Each structure stands twice: as C-alpha cells, then as structure tokens.
Image (cartoon, rainbow, N blue to C red):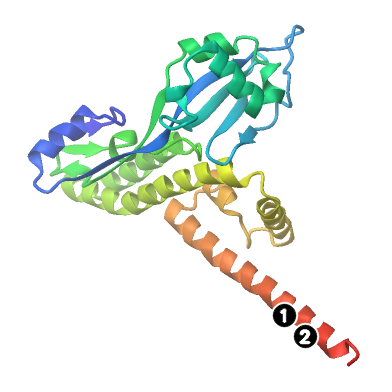
Amino acid sequence: MIGVDGAFSAVRQSMQMQINRFEYDESYLAHGYKELTIPPAPDGSWRMEKNALHIWPRKSFMMIALPNPDGSFTCTLFWEFEGQRSFATTKTDDDVRRFFDEEFPDAVSLMPGLLGDFRNNPTGSLVTIRCAPWFYRGNICLVGDAAHAVVPFYGQGMNAAFEDCVVLDECLNKFPDNRERAFAEYFELRKENADTLADLAIGNFIEMRDKTASKTFRAKKKLDHALEAALPGKYLPLYTMVTFTRIPYAKAARRARRQDRIVYGALVCVVLLIVALLFRWIPR
C-alpha cells in the first residue's frame, strides 16, 4: 500500500500503531490564514500587475496576492490566531475595516467584498509534519504530505511529492525483488530533503513577513541576481536552486550557505582593503 492520503493520513496513523518507537512531530505556526479576493476591473482586466507576487509585509504578519486567469487576485492574510491584534480580537465589521484601513489602505479600495470575505471564509491553520520511518516492512510506504507536510511559503509541497514518486520508482526498479529494501532506500534518500524543505518553508515565511521591506535584504537579492548573471551555472541563489533545478533541497541549502560565506567574506575583504588604502593615503 502506498499512503498518499495527505497531512492527516489514516495510513500513517495505522503505521504508528504497528511500529515501535515511531517518530512523529506535528507543529503549528502561531499564525493562521484567511483567503480574500480582489475582483477583476469592470473591463475584466487585473487591477494590479499580473506577473508578480504581491506582498504587504508587516513584521509580525503579512498579506499576499496572486493573480488568477479570470483577472481576479486571491489574497491571503497570514495573521496570529491570538494576541492583542489578531484573528481572535477582530470580530466585527468595524474591527475588520479599521484594521485594513490602518495596515493595507492601498488594498482596501480594490476589495469591495472584504467584509463578506472576512466574515464568511474560514481561518485555516498552518502545519508542519515530520515522521520516521516512512515505511512498514515491505507492505506500506508513505508519499507526499502523508510523510512530510510543509507550510506553503516555498510553493514546493506538490513538487516534493512528485520528487518522492520519482525516487520511489527508481528504488523499486533498483530492488525489484526486495520491496522493503526499496522502501528503506527511498526513505534514506528523501528524509533529509523533506526536513530541509520544512525548514526552508518556515524560513521563507519569516523572510516574506519581516525582511522584504528591508533595504539590506533587497540589496542582497540584487547582488544574488548580479552574481547569477555574471557567473552562470556557478553561482545560483537558493530560490533558483529550489524552484528551477533538480538539485536536492538539502544540497541546495548547503550550497547556498557556502555561497553566502564566500560572498560575505569577500565583502569584508573589500571593506578592509578600502579602509587600508584610505589609511595609507590620508595625510598625517
């Protein structure tokens, strides 16, 4: 049996009852999410740039908007469940209007259905699930969210499941007469990458929420793109490696850390060189 029944997998639960010392961790962000809508303009066009991910970063929370083919945008508010300003304390239409007027004034005019959307659309939770092992003998194997559910901030959850399928197929072909060994090798090859993706997804949430408004962060992104253009195939930003290559997640994360150490080291050397030259040439 191949368990592909999602984050709250019944197949995985049955494995927990069969496997001694089965490892399982289910953790939630303090933030939930609520979907809202920016409808198309009267002529059916998009009200904002359609070839972009729109982010309203607000340090402890954020809203994003993604375009749809019909000219609308799906907005998602990521906000704390509890707290002085949170989903828990924002109940009335006046509360909602006041919050959006203060935090997202440029978006409010584009959202005529805001109050109804906020009132009627459910508030969802954001879960990360890790477990081990992903198989039971040669009988059961987990794939996708059943094995490793992640929060959506890298947009890689479905891709990770497809990668599981590719690796599992390769392992089954490698050990056609020993399914348990095939499952074990699949688990060994994929577990580190799944855990890395879980960490990357949470890290990208913090980055989107806290750092995208930072001049330093944007300067680092520009430097990444400049180095990628200057050193094609040799310097790859983490996002490029994760999204546009088949480099495994764990290997991509290690390479990105190594690149960052080199870049930051080079910048420090340049600064020290400039200081040394200035010190040498300044009249005493």
Q: Could you tell whether 277 is left or right of 114 in the image?
A: right
Q: Which quarter of the picture shows residue 158?
A: top left
Q: Which residue is mark 2?
A: 276
Q: Could you tell whether 109 is left or right of 119 in the image?
A: right
Horizontal and vertical percent position of residue 61: 53, 35
Q: What numbered label is drawn on residue 62?
A: none
Q: Residues within 10 Å of mark 1 (few under 14, many from 20)?
A: few
Question: Which residue is at 67% across, 49% downward?
Answer: 214
Q: Which quarter of the picture shows residue 123?
A: top left
Name the amino acid, label 1: Leu
Q: Measure how far apart labels 2 and 1 are at the Cα level.
A: 6 Å
* Total numbered circles: 2
Q: Could you tell whether 124 is left or right of 277 in the image?
A: left
Q: What numbered label is drawn on residue 272?
A: 1
The answer to whether marks 2 and 1 mark residues whose Cβ atoms lie closer than 8 Å is: yes
In the image, residue 130 above or below residue 104: below
| Residue 177 visible to the viewer | no
Q: Residues within 10 Å of mark 2 (few under 14, many from 20)?
A: few
